[in-house]
């Protein structure tokens, strides 16, 4: 353990959050100073095109504990969090949304649990304020679906707001997949985990950076990175439809032998062909989803590119490719 390493790192991804950054800093510093632990605030600028970076630089100039990882472009929320975990140096790292939907005051309770010996403390939303019914409905559906079909038990109504002990952080650093679903990976790594409840607030200012399209992609990443079930769906459907068609053949033969005129004509043929054609295309699409993800992983590009890392000491490794640090005590 180096002398100037903080005890607690707070990691917040920032994408065009100009109106909230000052307030974020004030609330985090009030909470953290109240705890009496040394801390750092690692802000990841995920390609913001408003004044976010400028404000971050001002915050850093006023307080050296604010550090900035500035991406070369927008890489997305999950990769911003990943970079935060790569750069954070604390004995515990707290991931928090920059928009103050996750109240910084909850961190005190997380730290308490960590001191009791828990290595991952995740925050469960007991109540969500200021969300549309559509978001609440799709989110609740999604968490139940993903738990139903995947091997990892992702706690319902849990986001990325959590505290991770350094051991857990080092474990997560070794996971370098591109289509990442951090809240799933945080469960997958294991360790001693516990949940605490909190009320998710309304966004402090600005608008959500997760439009429906992004949410859908995020959900697909979550499912495909933890489950093969969609791929097996084609097999199941194939068996079911084949079973029905055998039944259909038998019925048709019996009807013809008994001289019935039922099911004559092209309409029934056409419907059956279109139906099976649709199922085949959907199955092919599912295979395509997985294939596209495999393609992206095989290219093995860096997860994100860092333009500047401001305030870190010593300067982190090669820009863009952060080597997972292996803690000697874990070997
Ligand atoms: N965010 C990011 N990159 C993106 C989208 C979002 O870093 O491409 C950040 C955003 O600034 C915020 C957090 O991720 O701090 C969560 O985003 P948001 O609040 O828009 O999502 P919601 O709470 O509506 O699900
Ligand atoms: Mg938000």
Image (spheres, rainbow, N blue to C red):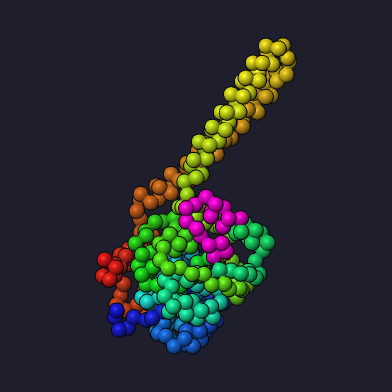
Q: Is residue 288 above or below residue 191?
A: above
Q: Position of residue 120 (x, y in %)?
A: 44, 70
Residue at point 47% right, 86% down?
A: 35
Does the segment drawn in magenta span residue 153?
Answer: yes
Q: Is residue 26 left or right of residue 60?
A: right
Q: Is residue 55 visible?
A: no
- Does the magenta run of residues contain 211? no
How far across and down, in percent of the image, does residue 301 sit?
Answer: 35, 55
State left or right for residue 87 relative to residue 182: left
The quarter in which the N terminus is drawn is bottom left
Looking at the rendered structure, the number of numbered marks drawn on it comes to: 0
In the displayed structure, would residue 103 be above or below residue 147? below
Query: Quick one: quadrant of the C terminus?
Result: bottom left
Instruction: Give the left or right position of residue 173, taking residue 107 as reference.
Output: left
Q: Which residue shows up at 37% across the image and 60% down it?
A: 175
Among the 4 quarters of the image, the one containing residue 134: bottom right
Residue that lies at the very extreme toward the right in this rendered image: 261
The residue range painted magenta reads: 141-158
Q: Residue at x 37, y 72 (%)?
A: 166
Query: Could you say which is closer to the camera, residue 151 or residue 162?
Result: 151
Pinpoint residue 153: horizontal percent, then vertical percent: 50, 58
Residue 229 showing in the rendered view: yes
**Against 216, is 230 above or below?**
above
Along the line of sight, the residue nearer the viewer: 158 or 286: 158
Q: Quadrant of residue 245?
A: top right
Task: Please tell me whether residue 294 is drawn above or below residue 214 in the rendered image.
Answer: above
Residue 9 location in percent, x, y? 41, 77
């Amino acid at each position: 353990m180096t002398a100037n390493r903080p005890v607690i790192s707070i990691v917040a991804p920032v994408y065009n959050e100009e109106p909230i950054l000052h307030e974020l800093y004030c609330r985090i510093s009030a909470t953290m100073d109240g705890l009496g632990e040394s801390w750092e605030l690692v802000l990841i600028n995920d390609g913001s095109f408003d004044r976010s970076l400028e404000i971050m630089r001002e915050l850093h100039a006023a307080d050296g504990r604010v550090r900035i990882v500035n991406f070369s472009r927008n890489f997305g929320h999950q990769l911003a969090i990943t970079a935060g975990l790569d750069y954070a140096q604390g004995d515990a790292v707290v991931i928090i949304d920059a928009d103050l939907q996750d109240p910084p005051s909850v961190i005190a309770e997380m730290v308490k649990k960590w001191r009791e010996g828990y290595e991952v403390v995740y925050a469960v939303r007991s109540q969500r304020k200021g969300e549309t019914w559509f978001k609440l409905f799709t989110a609740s559906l999604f968490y139940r679906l993903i738990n139903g079909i995947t091997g990892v038990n992702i706690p319902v109504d849990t986001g990325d707001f959590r505290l991770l002990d350094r051991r857990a952080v080092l474990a997560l650093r070794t996971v370098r997949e591109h289509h990442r679903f951090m809240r799933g990976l945080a469960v997958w790594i294991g360790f001693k985990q516990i949940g605490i409840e909190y009320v998710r607030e309304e966004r402090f200012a600005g608008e959500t950076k997760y439009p429906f399209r992004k949410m859908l992609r995020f959900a697909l990443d979550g499912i495909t990175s933890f489950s093969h079930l969609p791929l097996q769906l084609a097999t199941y459907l194939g068996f079911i439809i084949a079973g029905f068609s055998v039944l259909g053949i038998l019925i048709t033969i019996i009807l013809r032998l008994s001289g019935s005129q039922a099911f004559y004509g092209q309409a029934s043929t056409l419907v059956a062909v279109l139906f099976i054609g649709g199922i085949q295309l959907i199955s092919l699409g599912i295979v395509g989803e997985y294939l596209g993800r495999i393609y992206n992983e095989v290219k093995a590009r860096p997860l994100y590119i860092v333009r500047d890392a401001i305030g870190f000491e010593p300067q982190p490794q090669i820009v863009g490719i952060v080597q997972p640090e292996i803690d000697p005590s874990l070997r």
